[in-house]
Amino acid sequence: YRLPEEGPADIRIGNVASDLGIVTGSGEVTFSLESGSDYLKIDNMTGELSTTERRIDREKLPQCQMIFDENECFLDFEVSVIGPSQSWVDLFEGRVIILDINDNTPTFPSPVLTLTVEENRPVGTLYLLPTATDRDFGRNGIERYELLQEPGGDGGRRGGGGGDAAARSSVFELQVADTLDGEKQPQLIVKGPLDREQRDSYELSLRVRDGGDPARSSQAILRVLITDVNDNSPRFEKSVYEADLAENSSPGTPILQLRATDLDVGVNGQIEYVFGAATESVRRLLRLDETSGWLSVLHRIDREEVNQLRFTVMARDRGQPPKTDKATVVLNIRDENDNVPTIDIRKIGRIPLRDGVASVAEDVLVDTPIALVQVSDRDQGENGVVTCTVVGDVPFQLKPASEGEGEPQNKRKYFLHTSAPLDYEAVRDYNVVIVAVDSGSPSLSSNNSLLVRVGDTNDNPPVFSQAMLEVSFPENNLPGERVATVVATDADSGKNAEITYSLESSPLSSDAPGGIFSIDPDSGDVSVQAVLDREQRDTYEFQVTARDKGLPSLQGSTTVVVRVADRNDNEPRFMQDVFTFYVKENLQPNSPVGMVTVMDFDKGRNAELSLSIQPGDRDHDQAASIFSIENDTGTIFSTVSFDREQQTSYTFKVKAVDGGEPPHSATATVSLFVMDENDNAPTVTFPSNSSYTVLPPSSNMRTVVATVVATDADTGLNADLNYSIIGGNPFKLFEIDPASGVVSLVGKLAPKHYGLHRLVVQVNDSGQPPQSTTTLLHVFVNESLSNATVVEGQVARSLHTPLAQDIAGDPSYELSKQRLSIVIGVVAGIMTVILLILVVVMARYCRSKGKHGYEAGKKDHEDFFTPQQHDKAKKPKKDKKGKKGKQPLYSSIVTVEASKPNGQRYDSVNEKLSDSPGMGRYRSVNGGPGSPDLARHYKSSSPLPTVQLHPQSPTAGKKHQAVQDLPPANTFVGAGDNISIGSDHCSEYS
């Protein structure tokens, strides 16, 4: 905002509300001026900003003293915008730029300006003139100078700085130059010859104008003195000489010597010293030697009359005209203790004092001032420090009239107080002698006396037993009830002892008690005429005055303070009816979960609140045992750690009960919502680790193999699951949908893919940090499921195979083809050489093998993990050469039992099957004829289950029975994606 200075009160500056875009008029939004109230004020309802009664003078504002930019002089202020019931407050800063007006006249430093110009100066010589000053600035500042011709002379004038030209002077003209700092510098230019013998001085008028509207101007006399040529002036050694001189020094005492030098020679270099600007007292008290410059005492100097002499001394040469220089002499007069203290006793107040006699009534109170004593000493320092006391045994004493530290030490004022009661019947006159002693060395003293005459009067005013009576009176009273009774006593008798009572305002309170309280003038009973409310006002203070009926009447007074006692008439009040808090689950027990605020407008015990947790509805009736509340702060603590999966929210009530009788209470509802944290790993519900799915080799692409189903007890992103295959898929035959968990066939099945495939599937949630679970999906690729026990055995073994090792199809498919070709070639060669002998030998060998069991190193054509294609009900056939057919691989295995050692571990991976029982290693046993060497068909670095083959196993024609327990669960639990399963080779089972 912008505001001109020197404006009257209540000048409108602007509307803060409209400038801020705030709608007013409803009374809900109010405004308050937080700073700048010395000169500004604001309407609380409309936001109208205006000036106060204090006048704004731009030139006197401290922050604008050296400001010459119009926009740099300003008043800062702060306005707060307050919402309904102060529910919100916004603070804004503002600035009022104070605009300058032309309220100051430019002035010269002196009404007479003297300029000395040497004669014979060439035309065009320029002399700088003193500049005028204007407290305004800008266009209101100095605009131009004008030179006016002298009255009756030929000076003429010329506008300097843009004014109209008038008649020109034949000797001088005025020129105004602009300085670097923007000021205007008047300059006097010689334009004609100067001859001192014809004319030795010129008197012109110099006028200055400002640029205001209307313009202000002033003028000064410019006195131009034409001097003779004497080009060297005397020069003092220093411009200021200062010395100390003891007062009362004898005449002739030297003080100091002034010295000046002149570079000229002859008469122009001869210097004489004379007084310059010196008062008559200086010339009377001091002597200056014209030749030597010695300054000495001419007459004794009294410091009490003159404490400092300040004058100038001129050094003048004898040239024509002479040149001069001046120096300032400061002579400080040092004090001597040469003055005795003086005691002046004057009247004070209403006690008369005339001709040294004071008339004091006998009923004056003790410590009443009866006279003013002023003690002074014309000396200074310690010589002027005066101690004053009352001499003799009289009931009077002196007390300082003021305790101010700035009081001069050599001039003090005391009150003469009564120090004991006066009794006209005992002593009628007192001669009070006052002695004053200064602190000089030696000290000087003086005394004065006062005659005090005691007068007999009605000297006993009514007296209350207490100077202040405090009464406690309960609120919600009935009008007319008696509050208290005040009683005053008077030691006099008769009319002088008859007392009447009245109520008056207390000096500390401007409220008149008449509308609320009354007093019986005779009995002093104080009654209340209105119903008191402590919450509106808790204290009333007034004065009871007791007057006697003597002449003159005396009175006494006491202050009555009525403390309104509180009654429990206000209920506790919560800041909100419903408090809503959000906390994270897994919070440590006994942690704060929220804070409620409650207040009570009563006080004392009626406002002492007790907070407690109240049960909520039937679903949350255990809140009192779960939560606790701190009585002093209203902080709510939990005694348990929250689990969102168990309970998502809690609702209960907080009750506040005050300590009044009867007590009042209030309740507020607290709703606590538990926020989810990623503290649950996904749980796979299908498939289980021990299950498998049969997939025909003729299955088409995108055939759905199985669907992995998982759940997560968390919510939101923490329960957003994605699926991935992290192992067991070296041929890239399968892929899983990341969102649905559907496992599909994406590659074409070949013979080498026949057999068991173990897919390692990882389920991750989207929490931070993420949780994960790993599960196994077994897929058995074959046309049909002819022997489920074999497949189940393979699945059982895969549960104990490290996850880094892939199980995918027939691992010995290619190796079996090579071995078969070699065997056929060898057999064909042998049969060609010795056909008959080989037939006999082979026949005997086959009979021997059927009787004595498996031989190490013998090739076994059936793979342990390859499904059998023969009919188990048929017997083995002999080949064309009469050999017996080979028995199936599991023809001698009937019962498999797994022993369970204390634990299991997995090599090559960082996780373990949480639901698989521990297994030992396979151990070799003696089975029946044709029992396979299982150790050759399972190679692994991890611990393997111990298998016992019982001799009494059923024959090969019967169904295999697998009694080994498979893991019932199906998940591996991990904390992230740190499972390292990266193998592209199949397991070796041959």
Image: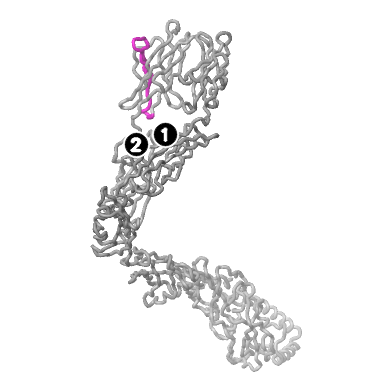
Secondary structure beneath label 2 = strand
Residue 200 sits in which quadrant?
Answer: top left
**Is 96 rendered above or below residue 226?**
below
In this rendering, is residue 3 above or below 564? above
Q: Is residue 582 among what the camera can see?
A: no
Is tag 1's residue or tag 2's residue first in the polypeptide sequence? Answer: 1
Residue 903, relative to residue 474: is it above or below? below
Q: Which residue is mark 1?
A: 65
- Residue 373 pos. (x, y %): 41, 38
Image quarter (top left, top right, bottom left or bottom right) of the N terminus: top left
Nearer to the camera, 586 or 87: 87
Q: Amino acid at mark 2?
A: Arg
Name of the residue lying farthest toward the top: 198
Q: Is residue 686 above or below residue 883?
A: above
Magenta stretch in the rendered image: 135-160
Please say whether residue 230 is one of the residues in the magenta stretch: no
Q: Looking at the picture, which amino acid does disc 1 mark?
A: Gln
Residue 930: x and y, percent? Answer: 67, 89
Quarter residue 572 falls in: bottom left
User: x and y percent of residue 840 in the render?
Assistant: 74, 90
Which label is found at residue 354?
A: 2
One can see residue 21 in this view = yes
Residue ID at (67%, 86%): 932
* Nearer to me, 841 or 340: 340
Q: In terms of image quadrants, where is residue 272?
A: top right
Q: Are marks 1 and 2 in contact (CB under 8 Å)?
A: no
